[in-house]
Image (spheres, rainbow, N blue to C red):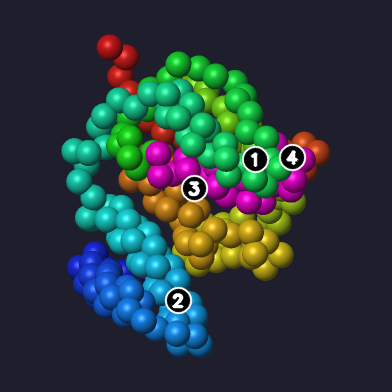
Amino acid sequence: MEPLPSDAGHELRTLLTRIRGELDLVLRGDVSDPPRSQLERIQQELELLSRICGRLLLLARLDPSARDAGHLDRSVDLEEVVSELLEQMSPVARDRGVRLRRGASSALHARGSRPLLVEAILNLLDNAIRVTPAGGAVTVSVDDEGGAVRLSVEDGGPGVAPEDRERIFLPFYRIPRTAEAVEEGRGLGLAIVRAIARAHGGRVELADVLGGGCVFRLVLPAAPRS
C-alpha cells in the first residue's frame, strides 16, 4: 500500500482535528449515558485515526521525491540518543516486566536528522518491548560497520518466520500471532523505520538471535569526523 500523498494526508488530518474539536465541545456539556459513553468511544477512535494519519504523512514526506536532503546532513550522537530513549522507554518496559539493557557501546555519530532517527529508534524499541514476554530483555547496541554506524535492537520475542521477513516492513502488515502486540499505529512502525533508513541512504536488517528472538539493525552513514 502506498502512503497518502502529503497534501491529501494534510487535508484529512485537518478534517479529523476539526471533528475532534467539535466532539470535545459536545462532551463538555451535560451529556448523560448512554450517549456520553458512545461519544467517548468515538473520540478514542478519532484520536487513533489522527495518529495513523500523522504516521502516513511522515511516510509520504520520506518519499525520495518529497524529502529535503538538507535536513539529513547533521551529525547525530547515537550514544546520546540511545541513552535518552532508554530512559524515556524505561517506564513502558517496566510495566510489561521487560528489562532494557545496553550492549556494545561506541561513541559514534551518524549523518542525518536527529528527530527522524529518534522516531526510528523509538519504533524499534517499542516493537521490541511489545513482542518480548515478561521476564525477558531488550538489548540496544551501537557499533561500527566498515565506515557506517550500526544500531542494533535485540528482543526476546518469538522471532519472525522467513515468509514474513519482508512483509513486516509493509504498511499495515501485522503477523497474525502477534497482532495484539502491535502498537496503535496499526503496523506502521517498521514501515517508518525502513523509510527513515532509506531516506538517510542506509538500510534496516533483520536477523535471528541464538536461543530465540530477533535483532533489528539500523545501518546509517557515519558523520565525517571533525
Residue corresponding to mark 4 = 136
Q: Residue at horizontal 64%, vertical 40%?
A: 94
Give the number of the mark in front: 1 or 4.
1
The first of marks 2 and 3 along the sequence is 2
Q: Quadrant of residue 27?
A: bottom left
The x and y percentages for residue 207 are 65, 42
The first of marks 1 and 3 along the sequence is 1
Residue type, mark 4 in image = Gly
Give the extent of the magenta segment: 118-137
Alpha-carbon span between mark 2 and mark 3:
28 Å
Is 123 covered by the magenta stretch?
Answer: yes
The first of marks 1 and 4 along the sequence is 1
Q: Give the number of callouts.
A: 4
Residue 80 visible in this rendered orientation of the protein: yes
Judge left or right: residue 24 versus residue 145.
left
The first of marks 4 and 3 along the sequence is 3
Judge left or right: residue 174 versus residue 159.
left
Alpha-carbon span between mark 2 and mark 4:
36 Å
Identify the mark at residue 40; answer none if there is no mark: 2
Residue corresponding to mark 1 = 94
Identify the mark at residue 123; answer none if there is no mark: 3
Residue type, mark 2 in image = Glu
